[in-house]
Image (cartoon, rainbow, N blue to C red):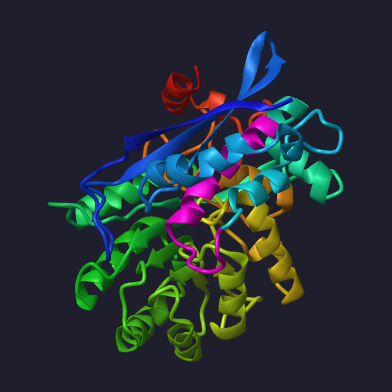
């Protein structure tokens, strides 16, 4: 078997929303189609992937370096020992040939999108939902049939007042979510506290509300927000400072004794290891948010999970960023703690299978081969136009 062709299309996911650091008015996303010569149901198997929100499309990098490497490789070096399916690890090694270590930036996003397409194809060729294939390979066949998820929103938006914020959060609760997340740091502290209190009027208790500063704060501001938020006992306080400022995170942990979350902007197992070593994170209290679609894909994600295991962290403390079906499959197949969800933004890429409702904060997965993109109609329209 072999890879016949691999394609990329850059699409817009622009909107008027902002967080504490960036706006999304020019945001794009790469969609990847990996076409094989394997035939199922009379059609070639096509694996699909895309990169997560918050980082732009990576078509130029893919076409310049990664696609040519993959297509130039001997097909025999890209398949598993049976010769009947692709080997994601061998493909990953080919993609990263002649890449120096370090510098985990845009290339990690490009490889992550390609890797997603590879795993989608692998599971389709095997005739298994990806999450069940992962459970078979790495968890003794035991998969989670449903995954805890939370609704991420609460962005800043022109003209969005407290009433609009509360109505947004009420919609998420009405959809079946229990925990919601909102942005902070894009307004003065006293205004953000009013926003937090408004949302608490909807959700009823701090254990149902997480907040996210998107790396905006210096140490003094991070501590000041922490002190102001302590009485609410929030679900978590996310990414207060720059994601690579481990000293800031470690010092903040000495002032804020409640759950914190980090990791969505760390893109390798080495970065994850440094956070664990130097960031003051508590494996009994805190949460880790690494996103496979931004961090070289599932092949690298498995290395990250091994690093966490070596340092005494349970996979149940890992809740990936991104709100996409790939992370949902990983969460169910590898026993993670849950997954982010974007019920109101980044469509059609955010969200999960059509027709599977959120119930009491949990969502199930479709029993179809692959990641399940075909069960999300609006997303698959975009993918199908590229793959066929």
Q: Taking 129 as reference, is 101 above or below it?
A: below
Farthest top residue? 42
Residue 323 shows up from this direction: no
Is residue 345 part of the magenta span, yes or no?
no
The image quarter containing residue 268 is: bottom right
Query: Exactly how many numbered labels are in the figure?
Result: 0
The image quarter containing residue 73 is: top right
**Image quadrant for the N terminus?**
top right
Is residue 111 part of the magenta span, yes or no?
yes
Question: What residue is drawn where x is 78% and y is 45%?
Answer: 135
Farthest left residue? 159
Residue 56 at x, y percent in the picture: 35, 49
Residue 308 at x, y percent in the picture: 69, 70
Question: What residue is drawn where x is 34% and y is 35%?
Answer: 11
Residue 87 shows up from this direction: yes
Task: Classify residue 51 as left or right of residue 120.
Answer: left
Residue 354 at x, y percent in the picture: 51, 27
Q: Taking 202 as reference, is 232 above or below it?
A: below
Magenta portion: prevailing SS class: helix
Task: Classify residue 199 as left or right of residue 330.
Answer: left
Q: Nearer the viewer, residue 201 or 272?
A: 272
Residue 254 at x, y percent in the picture: 50, 91
Q: Taking 366 as reference, is 295 above or below it?
A: below
The image quarter containing residue 345 is: top left
- Give the extent of the magenta segment: 99-122
Q: Nearer the viewer, residue 310 or 77?
A: 77
């Amino acid at each position: 078997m072999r890879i016949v062709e691999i394609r990329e299309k850059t699409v817009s996911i622009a909107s008027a929303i902002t967080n504490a650091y960036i706006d999304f008015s020019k945001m794009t996303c790469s969609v990847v189609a990996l076409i094989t010569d394997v035939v199922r149901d009379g059609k070639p198997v096509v694996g699909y992937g895309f990169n997560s929100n918050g980082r732009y499309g990576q078509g130029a990098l893919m076409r310049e370096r990664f696609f040519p490497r993959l297509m130039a490789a001997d097909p025999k070096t890209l398949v598993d020992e049976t010769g009947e399916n692709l080997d994601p690890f061998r493909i990953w090694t080919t993609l990263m040939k002649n890449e120096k270590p370090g510098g985990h930036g845009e290339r990690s996003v490009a490889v992550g999108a390609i890797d997603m397409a590879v795993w989608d194809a692998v599971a389709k060729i095997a005739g298994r939902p990806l999450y069940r294939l992962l459970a078979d390979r790495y968890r003794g066949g035991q998969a989670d049939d449903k995954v805890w998820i939370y609704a991420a929103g609460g962005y800043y938006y022109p003209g969005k007042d407290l009433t609009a914020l509360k109505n947004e959060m009420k919609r998420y609760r009405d959809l079946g979510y229990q925990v919601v997340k909102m942005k902070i740091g894009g307004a003065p502290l006293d205004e953000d506290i009013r926003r937090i209190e408004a949302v608490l009027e909807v959700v009823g208790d701090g254990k149902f509300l997480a907040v996210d500063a998107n790396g905006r704060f210096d140490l003094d501001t991070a501590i000041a927000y922490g002190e102001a938020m302590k009485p609410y006992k929030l679900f978590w306080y996310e990414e207060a400072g720059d994601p690579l400022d481990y000293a800031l995170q470690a010092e903040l942990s000495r002032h804020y004794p409640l759950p914190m979350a980090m990791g969505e902007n760390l893109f390798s197992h080495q970065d994850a290891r440094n956070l664990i070593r130097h960031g003051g994170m508590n494996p009994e209290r805190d949460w880790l948010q690494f996103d496979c679609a931004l961090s070289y894909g599932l092949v690298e994600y498995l290395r990250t999970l091994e690093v966490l295991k070596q340092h005494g962290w349970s996979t149940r403390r890992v809740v990936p960023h991104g709100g996409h079906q790939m992370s949902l499959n990983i969460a169910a197949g590898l026993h993670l703690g849950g997954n982010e969800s974007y019920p109101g933004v980044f469509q059609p890429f955010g969200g999960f299978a059509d027709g599977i409702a959120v119930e009491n904060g949990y969502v199930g997965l479709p029993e179809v081969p692959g990641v399940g993109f075909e069960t999300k109609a609006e997303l698959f329209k975009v993918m199908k136009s590229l793959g066929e």
